[in-house]
Amino acid sequence: MPVSMLVLAGALAAGQASAQTKSVPDSHPFRQCAGCHSLDTSANAFGPTLIGVYGRQAGAVPRFAYSEAVQKSGVVWNDETLRKWIAGNDTFIPGTRMRHVAITDKAQQDELIEFLKALK
Ligand code: HEC
């Protein structure tokens, strides 16, 4: 059996399949994102996977159909750009196809940025 299958089997056995999303607490701001962004290691859902997003160039996940706006933005995801994105993604990168989000509470922004940073 390939290693990846063994890993998957292990995760299933431990009851962790599809789970990372479920383990996000109800009160966590990522709840507003999880419907579109899978936390499976490499799977794209309606939105691209956010695993490894911190430090990455915008629009860089293979086989995800980004908008031209995001692809050509030249943005690299860091504290500053992520904060602007979650505060108003379509103001920061007009023409994005991600639905409008507006998380303006600084504590929630911090929580989200820390969360995204830890997705590796
Ligand atoms: C309705 C579905 C939806 C929701 C809800 C959503 N997203 Fe997205 N997200 C997308 C789509 C679609 C894209 C690709 C946008 C594009 O190509 O213009 C995207 C792109 C992104 C990107 C850029 C990824 C990259 O590889 O460049 C980040 C970062 C991101 N979303 C974070 C979030 C966060 C954080 C939230 C919650 C506050 C969220 N998204 C909520 C659908 C969604």
Image (spheres, helix red, strand yellow):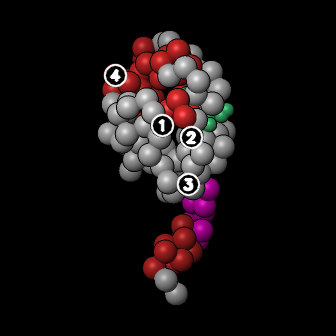
The residue beneath circle 4 is 80
**Label 2: how many Cα within 10 Å (few below 14, some 14–19, many 20+):** some
**Can you say whether 2 is above or below 59 in the image?**
below
| Mark identifier at residue 112 | none
Q: Distance between the residues labelled 1 and 4?
A: 18 Å
Residue type at the position of mark 1: Gln
Residue type at the position of mark 3: Arg
Does the numbered disc 3 mark a residue whose Cβ is under 8 Å from ligand 1?
no
The residue beneath circle 3 is 63
Q: What element carries label 1?
A: helix
Where residue 25 sits in the image (x, y, percent)? 57, 36
Q: Distance between the residues labelled 1 and 3?
A: 13 Å
Does the numbered disc 1 mark a residue whose Cβ is under 8 Å from ligand 1?
yes
Q: How far apart are marks 4 and 3 (CA)?
A: 26 Å
N-terminal-most mark, 1 or 4:
1
Q: What element carries label 4?
A: helix
| Mark identifier at residue 71 | 1
